[in-house]
Image: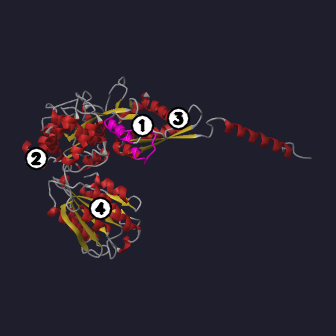
Amino acid sequence: MKPKHLLSLSSLLVIGSLLLSACGALSAIPGVGKKVTVTMLYGSEKQEWLDPLIQQYNQENHKTASGAEVTVEGKALGSIEAVNEIIAGQSQAVVWSPASSLYIPVANAEWRKSHSDDLVSGTPKDLVLSPVVIAMWQPMAEALGWPKQPLGWEDVAKLSTSSEGWAKYNYPEWGAFKFGHTHPDYSNSGLVAIVAQAYAALGKQRGLTAGDLQDPRLRSFLSDVQSSIIHYGTSTGFFGQRMFERGPSYLSAAVMYENLVVAQQSKQLSGQSQQLPVVAIYPKEGTFWANHPYIVLNAPWVTADQREAAQAFETFLLDKPQQTKAIELGFRPSDPSIALTAPLDAQHGVDPAQPKTILEIPKADVISGIQTMWEQTKKPVDVVITIDTSESMAGDKIASARSSLVQFINLLSDRDRLQVVTFSSEVHVLTEMTSLGEKRADLVRRVSGLIEGGDTRLYDAVAQSVADLQKNGDPRHIRAVVVLSDGQDTASDLSLDDLLAQLGGGGEDAGNSIKIFTIGYGKDADEKTLKSVAEPSGGREYQGSPENIRQIYSEIATFF
């Protein structure tokens, strides 16, 4: 007799058939099993706010009206760098959230060169707000008359061109005035800086026209401010990090967002940072909001489902709990009904009653014209490129190193000065430190013919490159050494300790010292050593490969 709890084979077959039918019916329901991904490129300065919210949203298993499962993927990237990737077809993002709306007219103008309509349509909603400020160490601001005396771009220009530096204000120990902002072609805060400088130079707050750019006062003012720049860069957050880690000997002041001042002061007040207090200077001539627009792109690859999902995520970010979290991180909520509370206060270096004057966003041709003028007036660079041509660089390494180096050379302007050093068993100067414009074509040919062979004389090559730059470089220029090596030192007379002792990297004028950028090229590169060489100077160490070397050289070029 069979146990009663066992089903017959025929019963099992019937159940299986029913289950299969049910699965088929479910698969026929619209949305079931379907997934929608919303890729969002956003300004890195709001990463600390956005990343946890993206994770929270994804864990809540949101769905579209048709039942499709929604996933948001965020990527922090420089505001202008991000949209350049979109326009070039390198990214098919659904949402772009730059730091401000300033670049939108230019982005639309570039997009319309190959499309029939705008990339950004309508007026996007703002996620959070943070005014663009000049962050300055509080004792330095007080030496200029802050907080009783309003400060701005006029004061920066005077300090930048003063031969006395801080000695004029009875603080000779502070050395020269050292200023910084990011690269206007890649970063929103850098673009804001030069547009604000243009307004200040001409005494205007709105109505800036292409004709205004012909005023000789503008070129002179831009040149004055740029003369105190220590270097540029792509990331406002990276600039803030360097300023707050390295202190007033590295940077006296830098253009950034109010929320970054709040974040630093929070660390200072809690004892996490031993640096001086820092305050936000709201330029008396006017500034811009970093309004962080949420833009669902008007691009052909954005589907109806992605648009619906992106708009739902926008609603989530604008909801009061998420806006309140933004205040905790130093942002101002986009909803004016939400009260501004700590840490948006004087104790954290900011003034909620500021800014008093908001500048008008110019038209695309005016913004582009200011960028062009900045290229002509920015601080030149004296750079030594030091490249490993040892035997281990054979094959794809030397081939991609040659082509990427040519690309890097072509990113520099004719006003920049360049020396190229190669090293293997010996250190060889391929071209001396002279203006690039007069030798660009010849240098490209010579670099294109580099061949590999011999040992790795890394330490000696770096030491000679720095010594040559100290001797032949112009201290009024940005000075940098870019080193590429794929292995460990095997032939130098100097030891690593000898090299590091020679390099130094401190002092009252550390910001104007030679910056060293190192690229560890391949799996065998001595990344630890290259990092120890680069970071004390205020430069960076990169991990390179034949696949990403072009990108690395492009990023290094944005420092100049």
Asked whether the residues under the numbered discs 1 and 3 touch, taking CB atoms below 8 Å apart as contact, a structural biologist would say no
User: What colouring style does the render use?
Assistant: secondary structure
Marked residue nearer the N-terminal end (2 or 3): 2
Residue receiving disc 3: 304
Instruction: State which mark lies toward you, 1 or 4.
Output: 1
Question: As displayed, is residue 373 above or below residue 200?
Answer: below
Residue that appears at 89% across and 46% down? 2
Asked whether the residues under the numbered discs 2 and 4 touch, taking CB atoms below 8 Å apart as contact, a structural biologist would say no
Q: Is 458 in the magenta? A: no
Question: As displayed, is residue 284 above or below residue 519?
Answer: above
Q: Label 1 is placed on what type of residue?
A: Ser
Asked whether the residues under the numbered discs 2 and 3 touch, taking CB atoms below 8 Å apart as contact, a structural biologist would say no
Residue receiving disc 4: 532
Could you say whether the residue bearing mark 3 is in a helix, strand or loop? helix
Instruction: State which mark lies toward you, 1 or 3.
Output: 1
> Quick one: 399 or 328, which is closer to the camera?
399
Q: Which mark is residue 116?
A: 1
Residue receiving disc 2: 165
* Dot 1 alpha-carbon crowd within 10 angstroms: few under 14, some 14 to 19, many 20 or more: few
Instruction: State which mark lies toward you, 2 or 3.
Output: 3
Q: x, y (%) of residue 386? A: 27, 65
> Quick one: 331 or 152, which is closer to the camera?
152
Which portion, as a residue range, is magenta? Answer: 86-113
Q: Label 4 is placed on what type of residue?
A: Ser
Residue that appears at 85% across and 44% down? 10
Q: x, y (%) of residue 170? A: 7, 43
